[in-house]
Image (cartoon, rainbow, N blue to C red):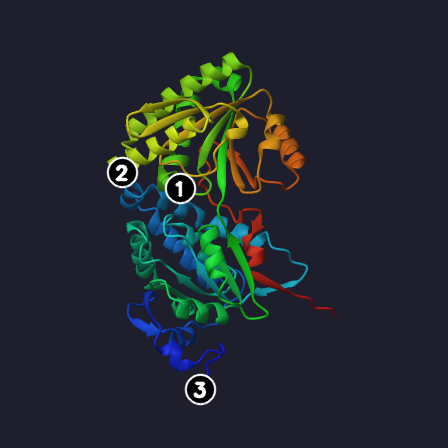
Amino acid sequence: MPHDATGHDSAFLDDAMLDVRFPADGRVPVAELLGLVRGSLEVGDERVRDFLAAFGRRLLRPALARRHPELGSLGFFLRPSELARTVESLDREHVRVPRGLVFHIPPANVDTVFVYSWALSALMGNRNVVRLSPRSGAVSEVIVRTLRETLGDADPVVAASQAIVSYERSDAVTSALSAACDLRVVWGGDRTVTEIRRHPLAPHARELTFPDRSSFAVVRAAAWLCAPRPARVTTAEGFVNDTYWFDQAACSSPRTVFWVGDERDCESARADFTDHVERAVTARGWGVDAAMAVEKRVSTYGLAADGLAESVEFRGNALANVRLSAAAAAPRRWLGAGTFAHARLATLAELAPLVERRDQTMTHFGFGREELEELARGLAGRGVDRMVPVGSALSFHRVWDGVDLPTEFTRLVTVVR
């Protein structure tokens, strides 16, 4: 029986069809798709940079950015100056080349993640296949449509070297793409990572995984109480953006707020903070449906029944607050959109023994750089990969989960004269 380059039976692959959504519509066999994704690019290829910058400008169009604010953040990430910084940050002591074919498996519940991953990989000169779940939301459709629009002015090599495909769960397709790739990038949680790892990679290939993570916020109570009202309003709005986009399900969205200071200050600051958040939620028109409201009540009352919560407070269906009986009881699991646990710490140093490896992002307010760096050194890699101001939890950076993505998307060639 004939075999294709992946080592799989070509007759087997011909039965595994995919809907190719970018660059063109149409169902094609996996073997044919692997033949279509071709083209030679370089690290920092100007043709890709031009395409990504043009794509970013389209995402920043006022009508689109107003309708989908997360696309504005994505467009800002793709501006020419940021692309140039990413390329210039690479080590120049070796010849850096693309890794090859990169297979991306992003989550269905955070529509924009696949673009960040794919864009950085393409910028590094790789050929890419992105598996977009059929369950992806409306924002994903907008992104794919905008990509197609942008292709009209792009160099043909861009369309030839990149593909976004969509297929239902299929061992045949995932196995074929995994066997063919040089790097597999898996987002979406522990279960997804475990599931995908059933499909072997080629011996030379590598894998990047982004499993389940949890995040939290830390606020110095005295700093909050001393902050002018405009600063508190802006910070509360930033907190709402951090949490209500993607229904608080993004790995970097905080679920617990730690208040640092004496008990009286923390109580006053927490109450004032909650009032500001409630006003921001109302002004933005954020809400949850009946099913989500029930989910939140089951989760929060469950914490109380387990003795982990001192009190539970609901402000409509959109905002729920839980006062924890102890800081060590901070929940890592998702409790429902707009549900926040609150705990008090006397000092920032008390946070260190509470941190777990799965903790990803710590948003902060009221702390200086030296304090944050001291905490980072004290944690010594036990957890927390990002410390960013409140309002920046969802701002993507080329270093994510402690991984320098542009570096991982390339290989180094040593040239000795």
Task: Give amino acid for label 3.
Answer: Pro
Earlier along the polypeptide chain: callout 3 or callout 1? 3
Identify the residue at horizontal 44%, vertical 81% (top origin). 9
Query: Which mark, by number, is residue 249?
Result: 1
Which residue carries the number 3 mark? 2
Query: Against 206, is 402 above or below?
Result: above
- Quarter of the image containing the C terminus? bottom right
Earlier along the polypeptide chain: callout 2 or callout 1? 1
Task: Give amino acid for label 2.
Answer: Ala
Q: Residues within 10 Å of mark 1 (few under 14, many from 20)?
A: many
Mark 2 to mark 3: distance in Å? 52 Å
- Quarter of the image containing the N terminus? bottom left
Between label 2 and label 3, give the one nearer the viewer.
2
Horizontal and vertical percent for residue 298? Answer: 34, 33
Query: Against 7, is 137 above or below?
Result: above
Q: Check disc 2 and report its element: helix, strand or loop.
A: helix
Mark 2 to mark 1: distance in Å? 16 Å
Q: Are marks 2 and 3 in contact (CB under 8 Å)?
A: no
Please state if 97 lies on the left or on the right of 179 as rendered: right
Which residue carries the number 2 mark? 291
Q: Nearer the viewer, residue 7 or 183?
A: 7
Q: Check disc 3 and report its element: helix, strand or loop.
A: loop
